[in-house]
Image (cartoon, coloured by chain):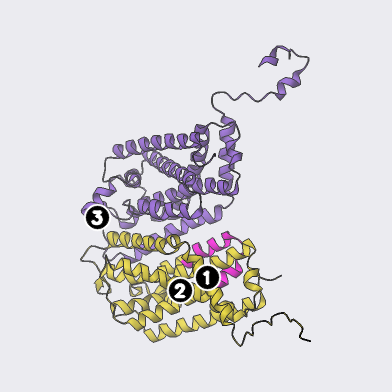
Amino acid sequence: MSCSGVATGSRPEVQSRAPRPLGRVNWLGVASLYRRELKRFLSEWRRTLGGAAVSALLFLAAFHLAQDPAPQPLPGVSLIAFLIPGLVVISIAQRSFEAAAFSILFDKLEGVIVDVLTPPLSAAERALAYALAAASAGLASGAAVVLVLAPFAAWLRVQPVPLALFLVMTALLHSLLGIAAGLWAERWEKLAATQTFGLAPLIYLSGAFFPTGDMPYWGRLAVKLNPAYYAVDGLRFSWLGQSEQAPLLGAGLLVLLNILLLILAWRLFAAGYKLKP
Amino acid sequence: MAVALPPAPRPLGTINWVGLWTLYLKEIRRFGKVATQTVIAPVITTLLFLAIFALALGGNSRQANGIPFSQFLAPGLIMMAIVQNAFVNTSSSILISKIQGNIVDVLMPPLSAGELTLAFAAGGVTRGLVVGLAVAATMALFVPIHIVDPGLIAFHALAASLMLSLVGIIAGIWAEKFDHMAAITNFVITPFAFLSGTFYSVERLPQLWRVAAHFDPFFYMIDGFRAGFIGRADTSPYLGATVLIGADLLLWILAYVLFRRGYRLKA
């Protein structure tokens, strides 16, 4: 700045008052927004993590009691072991989506979204901080489900690296969808509609509960267009060593989709879509 | 000299019918205004459940209690939608009013505790039945639904929606935050609804759990309601009816007493 020549040591306080140089990426800003978002989630962890765990256990119990005779969805895999990766994906997807969307819509309705819009954060930094925070919330929820279902799962063929990749991709994907939904909705009813009519069919009909070979013809076609299908299938590959699709295809598609959605979220923030007059 | 008197208050009579009707209408309009969220959303959710359970456990050859699995499942899912929506209607109405501070609009008018209980409960019953009808009509497109005993169906739909409306009133009065309500829904209502025989015949349960099921009012409502569609039940319909009427009566008295005392409603 122009005052740098004056402040040669006699008035060091001028330097301290200058704005913090931000550099190319405002890491401190991203970290602050990330922390704020995560605190929000942590403040109600009992309800969110407990709810996810109970709901996964209920699904497992209902399927366990209702299976007669026991179907074998994949060769050598019991129904329960087959269901667990699907239940983990569902809990991650629901929590990530909700964490991002609720937070943005709540701030819009309360009029405090300016707290996020006025600091020196670029659109990409905002998108990144929201997505990472919501994805962390989703992964925490997935971890809670894994924890309570661990005694019933098959652990012999777990491959940690693909497992981590598919979990993170799933969480990120639904966080980004949640950001888009939170920006688009102006009322709670609209957001609830995206969940009931968009997210729920996507995740419940992803093959989380049944092999897609059992679906009617049009269902088999539709499921191939469902990103959650590749998340469930990929997670099943990393967990059980068996899947319907090539895991590389699923991983590639998920990475590509995440990049596209990240660009979308970035452009929406940059345009101030439904955020700025 | 004729003095201009202020108009005398409307004589209320034994029961304040106008007040009762007005509060009932308010409860109906509350959910009617957002019908996408309150009626169509449960229809979609229930259809999704039908799809996943039928696809995972169905197969055309698969039978439960001697009938195709999807026909066994459908009545239970309809009942689940009825009770969940009856519960949500009363509990959310009271809790939101308390949090927004407009519960006084219900407490100030000349409505007795009995009239409050009746109007709220009737609102919940109406929502439950409307959703139940919508779900049944949509499901009939995918699963053959036969009506064997309309009386049994009507009785159980009514008794069950009344029961959960009353539970919703009590929960709405008790809860102070949305977190409390979410906890009741997650940890009480959903587990009961899920594990009470919607997805399987309790005859398949181990002895201990079968006995436990007979202490669960949700089991009787699902079992009796389903009997109206498939013509056979896991337990005696008279026992079920007695349990449901007894539970409704007890819950009614509890809700009445809470309104009467103003528990967590009045300072």
Instruction: Say left or right for A49 vs A235.
Output: right
Does B78 appear above or below B15? above
Mark 3 residue crowding within 10 angstroms, few (<14) / some (14–19) / many (20+): some
Please identify the dominant SS of the magenta region: helix
Q: Which residue is mark 2?
A: B126
Q: Name the element at disc 2.
A: helix
Residues shaded magenta: B169-189
The chain in yellow: B
Q: Amino acid at mark 2?
A: Thr
Does B34 appear above or below A253? below
What numbered label is drawn on residue B27? 1
Instruction: Say left or right for B104 vs A67.
Output: right
Q: Amino acid at mark 3?
A: Met
Q: CA distance from mark 3 to mark 2?
A: 36 Å
Answer whether labels 3 and 2 touch (C-beta < 8 Å). no
In reply to whether residue B187 is colored magenta, the answer given is: yes
